[in-house]
Image (cartoon, rainbow, N blue to C red):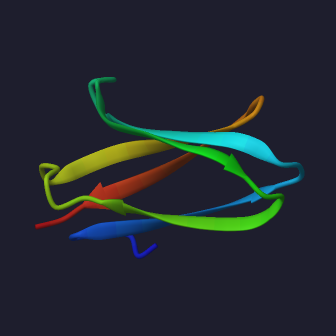
């Protein structure tokens, strides 16, 4: 949130167990334009921020991997 975003987006997710967390931001053409590995995170509700000021305006998919679970959120970057 918020969506659309300008300079940064917050992504929230819930984890049932301690797990390694990584994200990828993927553009509409399927290209990974940003990636980060957050290492092990505790179980429970988690939130992180993505800096979007270097991304072009458009629609992106944020893929969050937690162990064997994958969650995808759609964000729109507006300028």
Q: Is residue 64 visible?
A: no
Instruction: List the single residue furthest toward the top.
Output: 30
Q: Is residue 25 left or right of residue 47?
A: left
Q: Is residue 17 visible?
A: yes
Residue 60 place in picture, x, y as percent: 34, 45
**Which residue: 22% across, 70% down?**
7
Instruction: List the single residue furthest toward the right.
Output: 16
Instruction: Give the tally of numbered discs.
Output: 0
**Which residue: 77% across, 42% down?**
19
Above-or-below relation of 41 to 31:
below
**Which residue: 17% across, 50% down?**
55
Above-or-below relation of 32 to 25:
above
Q: Is residue 1 left or right of residue 39?
A: left
Instruction: List the single residue furthest toward the front.
Output: 39
Q: Is residue 26 left or right of residue 29?
A: right
- Foreground: 3 or 37? 37
Above-or-below relation of 13 to 72:
below
Residue 24 place in picture, x, y as percent: 44, 37
Above-or-below relation of 69 to 43:
above
- Foreground: 11 or 18? 18
Residue 52 place in picture, x, y as percent: 24, 59
**Which residue: 10% across, 67% down?**
79
């Amino acid at each position: 949130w918020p969506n659309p975003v300008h300079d940064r987006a917050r992504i929230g997710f819930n984890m049932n167990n301690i797990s390694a967390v990584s994200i990828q931001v993927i553009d509409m053409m399927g290209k990974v334009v940003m990636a980060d590995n957050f290492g092990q995170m505790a179980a429970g509700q988690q939130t992180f921020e993505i800096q979007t000021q270097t991304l072009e305006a458009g629609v992106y998919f944020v893929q969050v991997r937690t162990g064997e679970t994958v969650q995808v959120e759609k964000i729109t970057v507006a300028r």
